[in-house]
Image (tube, coloured by chain):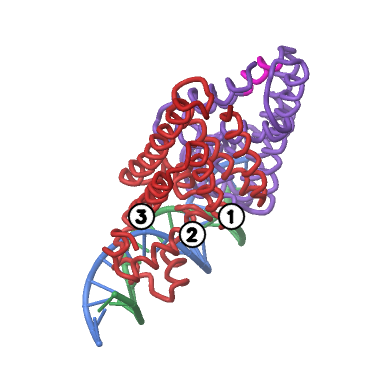
Chain colours: A purple, B red, C blue, D green
Amino acid sequence: MTQAQEQRTDTANRILDVAEHLVQVRGFNAFSYADVAGELELTNAALHYHFPTKSELGEALIARYAIRFTGALNEIDESRVDPPGKLDAYVDLYADVLRNQRMCLCGMLAAEYETLSAGMQVAVADFFEMNEQWLAEVLRHGHDDGTFRFTGSPLDEALSIVSGLEGAMLIARSFGDSGRFQSAARQLVTTLRR
Amino acid sequence: MTQAQEQRTDTANRILDVAEHLVQVRGFNAFSYADVAGELELTNAALHYHFPTKSELGEALIARYAIRFTGALNEIDESRVDPPGKLDAYVDLYADVLRNQRMCLCGMLAAEYETLSAGMQVAVADFFEMNEQWLAEVLRHGHDDGTFRFTGSPLDEALSIVSGLEGAMLIARSFGDSGRFQSAARQLVTTLRR
DNA sequence: GTCTATAGGCAGATAGAC
DNA sequence: GTCTATCTGCCTATAGAC
């Protein structure tokens, strides 16, 4: 159990679990406190005790998601596999989300970006920036040791891969076909291999 | 003026114009009839005369968008430039949307997919399929005449490019930085060039 | 921490006059 | 075609009892 989870009560975490699922499937603007309360057999008012405004709930969702994602990236780093192995593991993080019939939380929120509170907007952008920085480092190592070949900067290439994975998730969901994601991801990654 | 536009009254088209803008910026679930009515100085009830339900309005939006997009692809075909030129022109279609501070209509709706009516869901998927088919044909020609190099099928490669462009738009908007889109798009396209 | 009850507002949609 | 008026329902949020 992570530090962030221990800081919250069990109820608060169950609220976040249900809300996270709803956002990843339906979007932030398409779920209500009543949806969450119903699923947990609580009342609307009880939810507001834990998260006074929907905006605060949203910020908590992104914070927890980002911590969890960062943890997964750290695990990949500690596995000490080579850059191609790390890239594959990174793609698997996305594939896992899609396998659970979900869209990336921050990809979903990026679509709704203009309707989010300032705090949520900053947190979403930070999530993508963190991803790009991590991936750029993997690509730089792979470029230096000769396992990756690409033109442009590692950061530019990281940007295009993160974009490709987010877009592939988004579109694959419209076809209920995770094979579409796998195909697109394979194409994105294969071009890097020498 | 296209056939589809002539089939509708001016008012209906102005409604679609405003609604389209709102969906591309805020999303389908984050705009209301009142938003559109206010901007056009009409009433809520007048809108319902033209589009009885929001779902029908949504389906009309996608239909018009798809017709317009198909028209743009036909123009590219008729320009008779080589495959790399067609690919660049295709990327420019996306860049134009983003320059107007908008997300692709169907990319936005793909995020909200689970909350859409069955009719809208089908229309969104059809839009992507149409794009992929067109792009796959361009890639196939480029592969055959030696201007493009890629592994896998043209359709798989088309899938990854469409995904990359949609994802790049989505993320670039979160940074208010169209340069991010340009960088990602350049990376996607450059790997194809021999 | 959770409840009942409710405020206040906005959503999509309709009836009927003009 | 557009209006005024209104219905019904859901939304976020809060007050106050337990």
- What stretch of residues is rendered in magenta? A83-90
Helix, strand or loop under label 3: helix
Specify the label residue B99 is tagged with.
1
Looking at the image, which is closer to me, A138 or D9? Answer: A138
Determine if marks 1 and 2 fall on one subunit.
Answer: yes
Q: In this rendering, would B11 be left or right of B22? A: left
Q: Is residue B61 above or below residue B180?
A: below
- The residue wearing badge 2 is B22
- The residue wearing badge 3 is B64
Amino acid type assigned to the residue bearing label 2 in the image: Leu
Looking at the image, is mark 1 or mark 2 earlier in the sequence? 2
Looking at the image, is mark 2 or mark 3 earlier in the sequence? 2
- Residue A85: say if magenta: yes
Amino acid type assigned to the residue bearing label 3 in the image: Arg
Q: CA distance from mark 1 to mark 2?
A: 16 Å
Q: Position of residue B161 (x, y in %)?
A: 52, 34
Task: Name the chain letter of the residue that bears numbered label 3.
Answer: B
Tag in front: 1 or 2? 1
Crowd class of label 1 (few under 14; some 14 to 19; many from 20; radius 10 Å): few
Q: Position of residue C5 (x, y in %)?
A: 47, 58
Looking at the image, which is closer to me, B44 or B109? Answer: B109
